[in-house]
């Protein structure tokens, strides 16, 4: 695939790695390409990072035709840069595209684009412990008319941001509020797709939780409001009486790549792992009688994040004395070990850029 390169006049200074936070600083370049129904994808280019110019009637501004992905480039101790399971992100983006009637990108083309773009920006991958270069591929419908229909024009972009930890707590336990008013998604809707609208619908509850001192909300299913689904930006797992339980993918939950990786690691090591329905009733009972041993969230941005407190209807439950538990720590160490190339990747999950 041919990718045009437009050189920037000046390059930015790299940031101090101790002040990164999440998604506030962006690299020198971005990848872009356009699609229309007649010619398909065209004009693949790496251009200086900058503002976009879009028509005020553009579909995305009115009807929310927008999907995105999130993956990271990691700096290994030997200085090389690698991605973690990029094909999983590519496949999920195509699934999201299918749901929103946006165009697919052939898998091999997408991998080539990721590789060339990361290779171009790899100097932006920080090397300080826990830092990485977060890649945000996204696609939006870009018709210049107000009719509501599957789009005829779309744009795909990748931007890159050197990041530290997503939560200010780092790997320390976060406090999560169980949300019982708003819902994030319903089966048949767009919950399994990584689309902007899911996040827009989440903001009100997230804001309420933040005002009460919580990092994010834990969503219940949108129909019965009875079953645990996921957290705002991560999937969720619990250890209850020896069993590792994570909500099964019913269509309203994002099929997280970190979730999938945690399940694969735990199963291979002989843990008892169930992907099943977990009711709020079962969870609150386990919290009250002490059989909830550990809880954690998992996601690309959040990595593996211990949950130290859950709050439901102003009732606060402390989990594992507000400390990180052994399974959580083990998963964190295993995944980050593979991601940063510190331990052998027996699974073949890493993809070397160079
Ligand atoms: N659930 C939601 C709503 C998310 O935004 C994310 C983050 O991407 C996840 C789960 C975890 O997915 P992954 O592990 O693929 O990053
Ligand atoms: C990610 O983990 O990559 C995410 O997309 C979470 C994000 C919404 C901040």
Image (cartoon, rainbow, N blue to C red):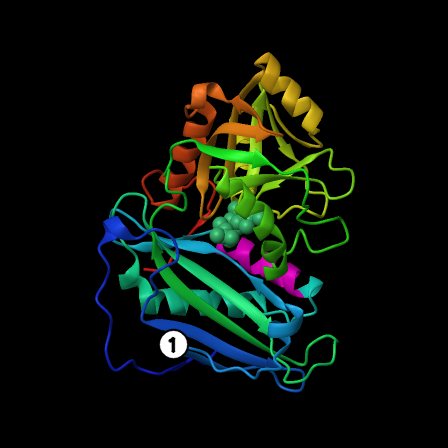
Q: Which residue is mark 1?
A: 50
Q: Nearer the viewer, residue 194 or 222?
A: 222
Does residue 124 sit above or below 206 in this rendering? below
Q: Is residue 239 part of the magenta span, yes or no?
A: no
Q: Name the quarter where the C terminus is drawn.
A: bottom left
Quarter of the image where one finds residue 271: top right
Residue shown at 54% from the left, 29% from the top: 310
Q: Is mark 1 within 8 Å of ligand 2?
A: no
How many discs mark residues in the rendered view?
Answer: 1
Left or right of residue 131: residue 87: right
Residue 194 lies left or right of residue 326; in this view the side is right
Q: Point out the residue furthest to the bottom here.
A: 38
For disc 1, the neighbor class at 10 Å (few under 14, some 14 to 19, many from 20) is few
Q: Relative to 56, is 315 above or below? A: above
Residue 34 in sight in this render: yes
Q: Residue at x 69, y 29 (%)?
A: 278
x and y percentages locating residue 5 in the rendered image? 36, 81
Residue 62 place in picture, x, y as percent: 64, 73
Magenta segment boundaries in residue numbering? 86-97
Q: Position of residue 146 (x, y in %)?
A: 70, 81
Toward the viewer: 105 or 332? 332
Q: Is residue 89 magenta?
A: yes
Q: Which residue does the image show at 54% across and 56% down from the upper left? A: 89
Residue 265 visible here: no
Residue 201 or residue 187, whichever sits in front = 201
* Residue most extreme to the top: 289
- Which is the main secondary structure of the residues drawn in magenta? helix
Depicted 201 relative to depicted 238: above or below: below
Quadrant assignment, res 168: top left
Residue 329: x percent and y percent?
Answer: 41, 28
Left or right: 220 as drawn, with respect to 131:
right
Tell me the element at label 1: loop
């Amino acid at each position: 695939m041919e990718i045009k390169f437009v050189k920037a006049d000046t390059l930015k200074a790299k940031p101090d790695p101790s002040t990164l936070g999440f998604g506030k600083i962006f690299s020198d370049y971005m990848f872009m390409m356009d699609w229309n129904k007649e010619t398909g994808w065209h004009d693949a280019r790496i251009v200086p990072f900058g503002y976009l110019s879009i028509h005020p009637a553009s579909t995305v501004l009115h009807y929310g035709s927008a999907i995105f992905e999130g993956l990271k480039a990691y700096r290994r101790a030997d200085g090389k840069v690698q991605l973690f399971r990029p094909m999983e992100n590519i496949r999920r983006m195509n699934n999201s595209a299918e749901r929103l009637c946006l165009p697919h990108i052939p898998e091999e083309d997408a991998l080539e684009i990721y590789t060339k773009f990361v290779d171009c920006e790899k100097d932006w991958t920080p090397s300080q412990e826990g830092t990485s270069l977060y890649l945000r591929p996204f696609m939006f419908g870009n018709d210049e008319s107000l009719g509501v229909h599957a789009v005829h024009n779309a744009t795909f972009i990748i931007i890159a941001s050197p990041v530290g930890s997503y939560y200010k707590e780092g790997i320390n336990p976060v406090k999560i509020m169980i949300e019982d008013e708003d819902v994030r998604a319903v089966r048949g809707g767009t919950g399994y797709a990584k689309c902007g609208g899911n996040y827009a619908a989440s903001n009100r509850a997230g804001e309420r939780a933040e005002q009460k001192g919580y990092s994010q909300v834990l969503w219940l299913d949108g129909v019965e409001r009875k079953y645990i689904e996921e957290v705002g930006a991560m999937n969720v797992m619990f250890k209850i009486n020896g069993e590792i339980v994570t909500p099964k993918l019913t269509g309203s939950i994002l099929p997280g790549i970190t979730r999938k990786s945690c399940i694969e690691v735990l199963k291979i090591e002989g843990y008892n792992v169930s992907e099943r329905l977990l009711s709020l009733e079962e969870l609150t009972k386990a919290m009250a009688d002490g059989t909830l041993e550990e809880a954690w969230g998992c996601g690309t941005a959040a990595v593996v994040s211990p949950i130290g407190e859950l709050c439901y209807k102003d009732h606060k439950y402390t989990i594992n004395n507000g400390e990180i538990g052994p399974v959580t720590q083990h998963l964190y160490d295993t995944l980050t070990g593979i991601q940063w190339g510190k331990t052998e990747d027996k699974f073949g999950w890493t993809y070397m850029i160079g």
